Amino acid sequence: MAKKMMFTDQQRQEIEAVMKGTHAGHVYKRLLVLKLRAVDQYDNERAGKVAGLHATSVSRVVTRYQTEGIQAIVGKRHNHGNRYMTQEEERNFLKGFIEAAQTG
């Protein structure tokens, strides 16, 4: 039988508060499974079906949250190219390419 993860009231409140923000789709799925596990008391299988993740992925998200905290779920984990650039950073990044293209 799988080990039951316990959440404190503070963790439940933290998850619900963070979910109220705007997040990328992959981050929202992680937060959703945390909420389903912590607040709604779903098991991994059921939470995974609702969020569109495998039960093993749900377990990994919960374990990561329990060991590393909320920042491991919503924080920037990888450098996905330009995904996290602001518009100003993107303009500056593309400026050199545009100038090079105009000069041939």
Image (cartoon, rainbow, N blue to C red):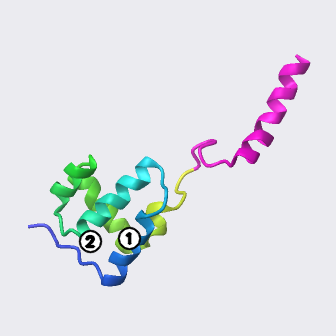
Tell me the magenta residue range.
79-104
Q: Which residue is mark 1?
A: 15
Is residue 93 found inside the magenta-colored segment of the image?
Answer: yes
Q: Which residue is mark 2?
A: 38
Question: Cβ–Cβ below 8 Å for labels 2 and 1?
Answer: yes
Q: Quadrant of the N terminus?
A: bottom left
Q: Is residue 20 left or right of residue 58?
A: right
Q: Is residue 59 above or below residue 49?
A: below
Which residue is outermost to the right?
A: 103
Mark 2 residue type: Ala
Which residue is more in the foreground, 72 or 15?
Answer: 15
Residue 18: x, y in percent?
Answer: 44, 67
Q: Is residue 26 left or right of residue 39?
A: right
Q: Quadrant of residue 14?
A: bottom left
Q: What residue do we see at 88% from left, 16% from top?
A: 104
Q: CA distance from mark 2 to mark 1?
A: 8 Å
